[in-house]
Image (cartoon, rainbow, N blue to C red):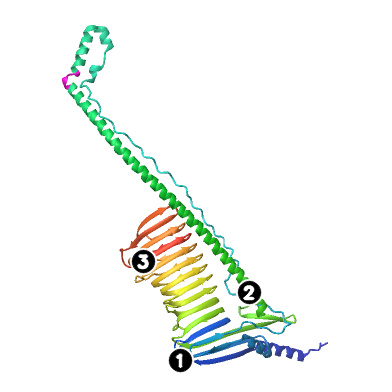
Amino acid sequence: MNYKPFNITLVLALMCSAILQAQTQTKRYSEKFNVDEDVEVAVNTTYTDLIFETWSRDQVEVEAIIEVEGITEEEAERLFKKWNFNALGNSDKITVSTGSGFHFRENDRMAFATTIPGNDFSFNYQIEVPDVDMIFEALPQEIVIPPIPPLPPMPGNMKSFQFDYDAYKADGEAYMKEWKKQFEKNFDEEYMKAYEEWGKQVKEFYGQEEKQRAEMDKNRAEMEKERAKMLAERQKMKEEIRKELEENRAETRIMLEKVREEARRASREAREAAKVYGYRVQPGSDAKIFFYENDGMPKNLKIKKTIRIKAPKGARLKLDVRHGEIKLAENYKDINATLSYTRLHAPLVDGKDTRIKASYSPMKVDYWKEGALHVNYAKALELKKVQNINLSSKSSNVVVKELDGNAIINGSFGDLIIEKVNENFSSLDIVLENSDAVLVLPSGAFDFYTRATQSRISTPATLHLKVNELYNTKQIKGYNKSKGSGRIINIIANYSTVNLKGI
């Protein structure tokens, strides 16, 4: 039996290399600051997860952790230095920031991208703006039936006027005398009086007819004047609607161009990031697993970056976060945040000065107590309970589980679902453009108004409504249960579908 030599040393070296590559290299940073209770915490990060907590101390503690798996300890040290984590500040303001570029040796061939699930950058919107039928039927002309004058009195025996030719041939002159006698008998003095009375009636009738004709001419002139006024108003309204449609078409074209431009800008930024950052995601791998190629040999690389910040309950957050995930504590107020490709989960959002602007960022908020929210291209936005909100959304899908106060909602090119409106709500104002909406109405009393242009709207039979429809616009006013409750729902819909449901 022949045996082939086996290089055990080589096998052991490969195994050790694999074990070293699988080890996780970790670097921790920690900073602590004595601060005022209302300190501002400004955070600017990329590809980093953020966890915010509150405590009763007048201190801000920042802990940053970067974990790398798949490279040697020496390579990890070089990568840690490229993170550029910084935490600086004083008692009034703390600033936390990170760099985003990682580079190895100059000869390494590297690229970078991210795979945010569910994002589609094609933006091939096909929006049809329907034309309005501007053909109006002419008003029907008035048909006037003139009054009939009184008929003359008729003789009592109409048979007396019938001349019997056969009797005349048989009796001759005797029949003629008898016929004349009967004829004159019917035209006696009583008949002549009736005839004279008829003459007076005819004269009086034509006198009244002249008066009525003059009155009718006057009324006809007024009707023609009113008709001309109505036609002028209709023409004016036609022009206003035509102008409004042209403006809507222009706004739609501008909006689509903005969407395309943002897509092009995002594509350019991704290409620039590929040049700067030096990594790309391996196909089929997790979004945070990257690889780089060195001398033609790919190496798997897993990176996890996390920053945990503890701050006083009165601290104010100012966030600029790209590509990450944020978990907020429920004691922060007046949050000012700009998010891109970032997931946000917050148990509570509060503060009249709260302003959150998010693009391509799914969000979940358990209780939105107060503040303004502007979202673009968010495929998943869930607000479990809302007290007071000013919400603007574009190309986003918004779900409000429960509304219990005031809401102003402007939405375009997306979906809106409000699953419940409590009886003690105050007001709900919705403006929709090219959107679909489903709203479950409250069971209590409220006033209701809707204006829908080029839109479909369905309402439950329980509402007391008055509907006016003109051309392509439907105006609906009414109430539920009773008028003047102090609670109102206003809906303006253009090129949209609105489905209103009762409980």
- Taking the spot 39% from the left edge, 45% from the top edge, the residue there is 228
> Nearest the camera: 282 or 177?
177
Quarter of the picture holding the N terminus: bottom right
Gap in angstroms between the C-alphas marked 2 and 1: 40 Å
Q: Residue type at mark 1: give it.
A: Asp
Horizontal and vertical percent position of residue 452: 43, 59
Q: Report the side of 461 relative to 23 (left or right).
A: left
- Front residue of 282/376: it is 376
Give x and y (percent) for residue 230.
39, 48
Direction from residue 194 to residue 87 in the image, left or right: right
**Which label number is shown at residue 31?**
none
Which residues lie in the magenta part? Answer: 186-190
Quadrant position of residue 38? bottom left
Q: Which residue is mark 1?
A: 58
Q: Amino acid at mark 2?
A: Ala
In the displayed structure, does residue 195 sit left or right of residue 475? left
Q: Which residue is pictured at 41% across the width and 50% down the height?
A: 233
Give the mark nearest the N terminus, 1 or 3: 1
Residue at 72% x, 79% y: name it.
109
The residue carrying pointer 1 sits among few (fewer than 14), some (14 to 19) or many (20 or more) residues within 10 Å by Cα, namely some
Q: Secondary structure at mark 1?
A: loop
Q: Is residue 419 above or below residue 307?
A: above
Above-or-below relation of 118 to 192: below
**Considering depth in this image, is 237 or 60 the residue closer to the camera?**
237
Q: Which residue is mark 3?
A: 488
Q: Which residue is mark 2?
A: 270
